[in-house]
Image (cartoon, rainbow, N blue to C red):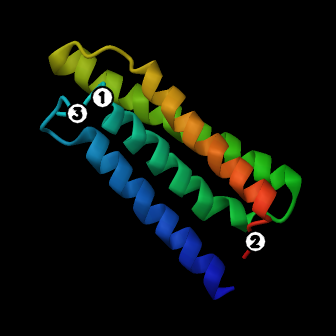
């Protein structure tokens, strides 16, 4: 029970950090469009998935968690678009960041599936 609480709490802190970092004022991201930026996205959402997927008790819950994380990735990029495109910088919607987030999510899903990652 404590292990699940720690995983869930850590996931919430990671989400808060991701939203903060994606919406901070020193935009645009200095490494935007680089391999390092792509690895950041894959890693961040892969770690988030590795924190949350072990909490699933069934295959259905695994897919619900996966869908929720994908929706968070989309929402984060849409929020960035609305904050930075409409108000300041005319920043385009970064669909490639959603792609990289999804790659990290799917890699974590495969790791959880084939290593039977459980709490």
Give residue 55's position: percent from left, percent from top. 71, 67
Left or right relative to 64: residue 101: left
> Which quadrant holds residue 5?
bottom right
Q: Nearer the viewer, residue 14 or 87?
A: 14
Q: Mark 2, mark 3: which one is toward the viewer?
A: 3
* Label 3 close to label 1 by CB (< 8 Å): yes
Callout 2 crowding tier (Cα within 10 Å): few <14, some 14–19, many ≥20:
few
> Which quadrant holds residue 36?
top left
Mark with earlier residue (2, 3): 3
For residue 34, the mark is 1
Left or right relative to 20: residue 56: right
Which SS class for mark 1? loop
Give residue 33's position: percent from left, percent from top. 30, 24
Which SS class for mark 3? loop
Image height of 85 relative to 80, above or below: above
Q: Marks 1/2: CA distance?
A: 34 Å
> Which quadrant holds residue 14?
bottom left
Q: Nearer the viewer, residue 28 or 12?
A: 28
Q: Marks 2/3: CA distance?
A: 35 Å
Position of the C terminus, as image quadrant, is bottom right
Q: Which residue is mark 3?
A: 31
How many numbered marks are there? 3
Q: Nearer the viewer, residue 32 or 65?
A: 32
Q: Which residue is mark 2?
A: 118
Q: Marks 3/1: CA distance?
A: 6 Å
Q: Is residue 31 visible?
A: yes
């Amino acid at each position: 029970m404590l292990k699940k609480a720690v995983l869930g709490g850590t996931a919430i802190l990671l989400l808060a950090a991701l939203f903060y970092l994606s919406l901070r004022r020193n935009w645009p991201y200095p490494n935007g469009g680089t391999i390092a930026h792509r690895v950041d996205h894959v890693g961040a959402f892969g770690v988030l998935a590795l924190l949350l997927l072990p909490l699933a008790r069934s295959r259905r819950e695994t897919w619900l968690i996966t869908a929720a994380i994908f929706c968070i990735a989309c929402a984060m990029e849409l929020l960035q678009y609305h904050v930075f495109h409409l108000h300041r910088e005319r920043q385009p919607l970064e669909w490639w960041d959603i792609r990289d987030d999804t790659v990290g999510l799917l890699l974590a899903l495969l790791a959880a599936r084939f290593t039977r990652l459980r709490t």
